[in-house]
Amino acid sequence: MIELLIFMDEVTYKRNINEAILSITSKIYSIEHECRTNFPYYREENKLKWFYTESCNWSGGHWASMLLMTDSKHDDNKVHVTLDNIFHKIKLRMYDSDIFTGFIFYYSYARRFEIYGRYNDLEIALEVADNLVSMYNKNIGLIPLGNECKVLGTDIHGNNLAAVDGSIIANILLYWAYDKTKKKKYLDTALNNLNNTIRIFMREDYSVTHMIEFVPYSGTIIRKWNNLGYSSDSTWSRGQAWFLLALAYGYRHTHNPEYQRIYLQALNFYLKNNNNSSMVPFYDLDAPMATLPPLDTSALAILAESYIIMLFNQGTQDEELLREIFYSFTPYIDSSMQNYILNHGCFDKPRNVATNADLIYSDYYLLSFLLHLKNYLSKGK
């Protein structure tokens, strides 16, 4: 199917992208109507409703950003009200010792500042960035998860734990803070966090492990493991995608050729070890087929975001792969009237949580990728 689709003419290609964007944005309204001022998290395939949280979960910023995309284009008063309530709940987390505040406040307050120019939003986002700088542990050279880290369904938190995705979760806000202020503490912390993630989490074959436990006062590593992967030495697909996104943002802000080189090698590892017939991987690149591993469209959504960023910044030029990425999504973008957007996401296979579901953060990255792709193609590149 994919082999045929990638050779479609340019007009059809662009029309398919526009149709996907319209389908997703229309469903944002439906999800907002269902969840109101709560934070949608996931919707399992066999369930009629979204599972949501009343307080802001780690992907709450992604949901806020999706609403901002809709609100800035349509100026919908009902969405205004929802956003005001959601932003109030998000603000309650600004002083948490939680690495996920990087994601949460970049995709909410920082994004709203970029759209509407509210100075108060700038101040709040910068204060959270300062808190992330203060969390940096110079002994290990990483920003740890934090003692108040909250990931639904797990009890993983602490200043003695760090994750490969920390190099994008925290860094995305730190890069933005540097762009706004030119204060080196933000960029230095982000690049130290990324460079030490490469040193500690990346294996010789450019795959990555997920988690480490370390001694905060010395930086001594106690163990490495995959909290969401198949085994301690396997490659969790979404972890590899998060690593690619971290490298893409690092390259975007520095144009360091070493980040480009590692990105292309890590991407090549993903492509060579993906056992599925399309670019949507199984939840772990090393999961035995005999175990019937679930797919994870969220891994491809994150990878897609990384790839379009590299393309915009001349870090890669393979437009055929870009087209293949898009058409790999099409069987999983739900076209029914239900409040599904992207099927077959796998959040947490080891604990069997949302192993075949629509995940709100993957919806965000898919929409962001499509909007960037539309913009890229409209410039005649």
Image: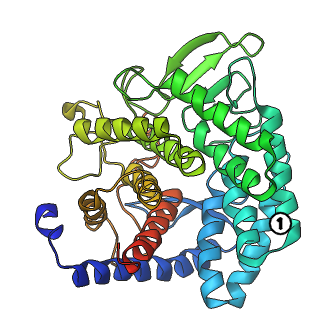
Residue located at (55% from left, 13% from top): 223
Quadrant for the N terminus, please: bottom left
Is 181 left or right of 300, judged from the image as shown? right
Total labels drawn? 1
Q: 7 above or below 347?
A: below
Position of residue 193 measured from the top left corner of the image (x, y, whole percent): 65, 32
Nearer the observer, 237 or 156 = 237
Judge whether residue 276 can be spotted in this image: yes
Is 178 left or right of 319, judged from the image as shown? right
Quarter of the rendering containing residue 89: bottom right
Quarter of the rendering containing residue 235: top left
- Three-letter residue code for mark 1: Asp
Position of residue 44 measured from the top left corner of the image (x, y, whole percent): 43, 58
Position of residue 255 measured from the top left corner of the image (x, y, whole percent): 53, 46
Quarter of the rendering containing residue 120: bottom right
Quadrant for the C terminus, please: bottom left
Q: 69 above or below 361?
A: below
Is 71 left or right of 203, judged from the image as shown? right
Residue located at (40% from left, 54% from top): 307
- Residue designated by label 1: 121
Position of residue 367 measured from the top left corner of the image (x, y, whole percent): 47, 69
Nearer the observer, 317 or 240 = 317
Residue located at (45% from left, 52% from top): 306
Q: 273 above or below 226?
A: below
Count residues near mark 1 (Cα–Cα under 10 Å), then give few for <14, some for 14-19, many for 20+.
Answer: some
Describe the colour scheme in one phrase.
rainbow
Indicate the secondary structure of the residue bearing disc 1: helix
Residue located at (29% from left, 51% from top): 280
